[in-house]
Amino acid sequence: MARCQAVVSSPTQSCQVVSLLPPTSSHRNPSPVAKQLGRYVVREELGRGATGVVYRAWDIRLERFVAVKIIHPEGPLGSVAWGRMLREARLAGGLNHPCICTVYDAGEEEGYGYIAMELVEGCPLSHVLMPAGVPYPFVFHYGKLIASALQHAHERSILHRDIKAANIMVNARGELKILDFGLAKRLRTGAALRASQSSAGLGSITGTIPYMAPEVLQGERASVWSDIWSVGVLLYEMATGRFPFQGHTVFDMATAIMTSKLSFHANRIRPQLAQVIDRCLQKDPHKRYARARDILRDLSGASLPNLAICWRKFKTPARVRPDA
């Protein structure tokens, strides 16, 4: 795996453009697409994910580069994936936050459904998590940005449902973008939506197992609390380089999430951060934070070294943490 130096090196260096979808291990040739979709001239492939292929494209009307995610109707997911992409565009298109990837447009051309969105430069957070995590000022800094973005989405009745390091992009300026609202759902008044798509063979649940809340693994409805749980997992992972609950198989990890007690002793997480993580990762969702803004409040109360000073000391990791 290539090292993502642009994220942690000098801000004057150019960042590597990476996929707006979590990359897969596939190295197959990209599916053939028209050279132009609507007003977008499609260029090189950036990455592949569960719902489509992402390309760098040129917007001939506004004269700027964008990322275009494309689904072919005859692909393995067909119209289901296109419907999911339209849902993503509608949900994310209604959000306006500096830490959420902006959706510009959606359309269909010559049988190809596509979404045009902001071209985010940088590296996935999952690529810069060292074996021991990242420096504490960055844990708090990134944690506050993520909480702020989620609060913005939750206030508009939108759940992300797949908050994880691979869906978060960071760059050399310390900026952050949350990507891939492909699993997002709109909250109904007075009720959360029940997950409906399968994941890793665990029945009708959706998401990425290490970040999933215990009640969702048990088939209950996704909610603001399950997004809060995912933030807690991410904070723990940034602080330690490890997931809070371990397992050799998907079943073992799911069982640990549902039954194991959270431990901070071996990883020596600072007390103030440990309190935030502990509240995010309560098995009973009603004992977690009720709102993402409460996470932001508690993380903002920490007394930490100046981030700019820490940034100069935080060089390229000795080795990049492999994807979980």
Image (cartoon, rainbow, N blue to C red):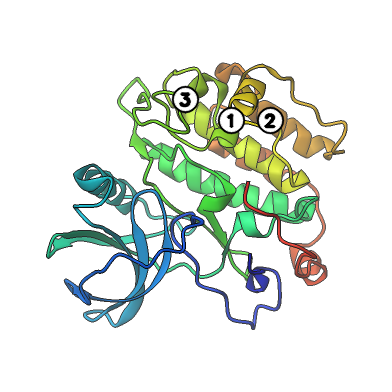
Give coordinates of residue 66: x percent, y percent: 35, 72
Residue 250's tag is 1
Which structural element holds mark 3? loop
x then y, percent, for residue 61:
21, 80
* Residue displayed at 33% across by 55% down: 52
Dot label at residue 202? 3
Q: Image check: 133 left or right of 255?
A: right
Label ID, residue 143: none
Q: Is residue 291 left or right of residue 51?
A: right
Residue 134 occupies which quadrant of the picture? bottom right
Do callouts 3 and 1 mark residues in contact (Cβ within 8 Å)? Answer: yes
Q: Is 295 situated left or right of 244 in this image?
A: left
Q: Which residue is mark 2?
A: 247
- Mark 1 is on which residue type? Val
CA gap, disc 2 to disc 1? Answer: 7 Å
Establish if 256 lies above or below 10: above
